């Protein structure tokens, strides 16, 4: 059964989550939480979900970008975003470092800000050191859309939402994005709306 998705304004979304010990990771409660979060992510649907979004202030997130999510997106847009399918995996107690200075700006949404989107700049490449669902260390090197998802989910574990990074004048409903701005270049959107970044 899918879990409740907490929405912006809930205190759990603004606090720093605590790390999990290996014993906690292997506990029944966490091992049961992971498939519940996976079901919730697919039901939504979305490409990432952090434990605070289901009311759990712990350093755990899941990522999965299924091929069918990109089926109706033009090849040119997928190439620009560097978006490829990502198999399901879990990240626990992550430490994120940017790799290089390259940035990428795209519209971003969130299951905890249902129905809205905004233009957000993110590092194009990242390295994440974390534990997997078995408590084993792993290192993830990611670029493009995958790097964006990781940054977004790890932000959640630190009480940060994409609206803290967005170009504030680009914040809009998904309906209006599809009506007026879908297909526009990011530079054109910023030019027409006026560039002003939150942070």
Image (tube, rainbow, N blue to C red):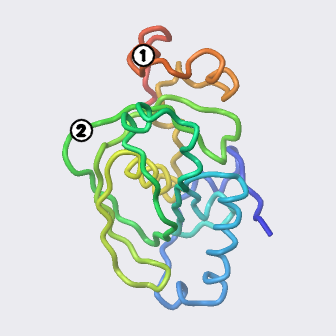
Sooner in the amino-acid sequence: mark 2 or mark 1: 2
Q: Is residue 45 left or right of residue 81?
A: right
Q: Residues within 10 Å of mark 1 (few under 14, many from 20)?
A: few
Q: Residues within 10 Å of mark 2 (few under 14, many from 20)?
A: few
> In which quadrant of the rendered image does the N terminus lie?
bottom right
- Tell me the distance, in whole angstroms, between the alpha carbons under discs 2 and 1: 19 Å
Give residue 80's position: percent from left, percent from top: 37, 34
At horizontal 29% and vertical 36% (from top left) the residue drawn is 103
* 180 vs 40: above or below: above
Q: Residue furthest top?
A: 192
Residue 31 location, quadrant? bottom right
Using the image, tell me which numbered label, if any, was put on residue 153: none
* 158 vs 171: above or below: below
Give residue 72's position: percent from left, percent from top: 58, 38
Using the image, tell me which numbered label, if any, was put on residue 195: 1
At horizontal 48% and vertical 18% (from top left) the residue drawn is 184
Give residue 176's position: percent from left, percent from top: 67, 20
At horizontal 30% and vertical 70% (from top left) the residue drawn is 139
Instruction: Determine which residue is flagged by label 2.
Output: 102
Residue 128 location, quadrant? bottom left
């Amino acid at each position: 059964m899918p879990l409740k998705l907490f929405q912006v304004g809930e205190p759990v979304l603004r606090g720093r989550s605590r790390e999990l010990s290996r014993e906690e990771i292997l506990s029944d409660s966490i091992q049961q939480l992971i498939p519940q979060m996976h079901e919730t992510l697919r039901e939504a649907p979305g490409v990432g979900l952090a434990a605070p979004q289901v009311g759990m202030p712990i350093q755990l997130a899941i990522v999965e970008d299924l091929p069918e999510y990109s089926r109706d997106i033009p090849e040119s847009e997928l190439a620009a975003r560097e978006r490829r399918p990502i198999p399901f995996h879990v990240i626990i107690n992550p430490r994120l470092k940017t790799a290089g200075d390259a940035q990428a700006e795209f519209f971003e949404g969130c299951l905890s800000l249902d129905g809205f989107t905004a233009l957000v700049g993110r590092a194009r490449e990242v390295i994440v050191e974390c534990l997997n669902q078995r408590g084993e260390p792993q290192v993830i090197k990611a670029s493009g859309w995958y790097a964006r998802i990781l940054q977004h989910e790890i932000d959640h574990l630190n009480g940060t939402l994409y609206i803290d990074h967005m170009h504030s004048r680009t914040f809009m409903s998904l309906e209006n994005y599809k009506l007026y701005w879908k297909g526009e270049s990011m530079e054109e959107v910023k030019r027409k709306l006026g560039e002003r970044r939150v942070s």
